[in-house]
Image (tube, grey):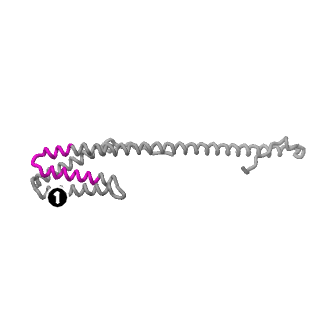
Amino acid sequence: MNEQTTDRHWFTAAVPKAAPAIATSTVLILARIWNAAGAEHSTGNAVLMGTLAAGAAAAGYVSINGHHGDGTLAATAFGLSGALAVTGVAAYADSIAPGLVLWAIATVLGYVLAARYWRHDRHESTTHAQHMEIRREDHRHAETIEIIRARTQTEALAYAVALSDARARIDGLPGFDHPTLTPTTRPELPSAER
């Protein structure tokens, strides 16, 4: 049971931890670019973003309260709704201040929600590692028993071969009188059947 263990590079381990900040920063940057492109005080654009945000929130509500509710789908829909709302406010406002406030709130909420999932994943990984260690120990136990059984059979076979060789040598000695020996003076070979 040889296992290959690989350590992740520090950058690979850090990227998921930075994902909430990267996502909210990207939304804020795109909203400010959209603001510069003419979305500032555009009622049509504000209505569009509000409608999209409300639609995403409604989809989240339906997915969590449906017959087969899916928490991941609901979290994604509510996250998208929040991102669309932040984008709409940051794109519509004159100043960057409302967008920065919403960006900070969204980033903190993103980390709070992500920490819950990270803790759950860490718990599942630990449980899986413990389960695999128990299985490895069970397999080691069975493996050890099989090794002992194989060694015992090998030693018994070696003993039988040595006994057979000794009997053949005794039978080949000059002056050996086989019929005069009693069964108690000569050892019996073990039977091949177990």
Find the residue positioned furthest to the right.
Answer: 180
Q: Could you tell me which residue is drawn at 33 percent across and 52 percent down?
A: 72
Foreground of the two, 137 or 85: 85
Q: Is residue 191 left or right of residue 125?
A: right
- Kindly identify the residue that appears in the image at 47 percent across and 45 percent down: 3
In the rendering, at what x and y percent does residue 174 appear? 86, 43
Residue 173 x, y percent position in the rendering: 84, 43
Residue highlighted by disc 1 = 48
Please check the rendered image and state whether residue 93 is part of the magenta-colored stretch, yes or no: yes
Determine which quarter of the picture holds residue 56: bottom left
Q: Where are the magenta residues, as a range?
A: 76-104
Q: Main secondary structure of the magenta part?
A: helix
Q: Nearer the viewer, residue 71 or 168?
A: 71
Amino acid type of disc 1? Leu
Splitting the image into 4 quarters, where does residue 51 fall? bottom left
Identify the image quadrant of residue 60: bottom left
**In terms of secondary structure, where does tag 1 sit?**
helix
Q: Residue at x 51, y 43 (%)?
A: 134
Name the residue nearer the viewer: 6 or 173. Answer: 6
Q: Give neighbour class at mark 1: few <14, some 14-19, many 20+ (Cα, 10 Å).
A: few
Q: Residue at x 36, y 58 (%)?
A: 67
Magenta-span inclusion, residue 2: no
Residue 96 in picture, x, y percent from top left: 13, 46
Would you say 52 lies left or right of 152 here? left
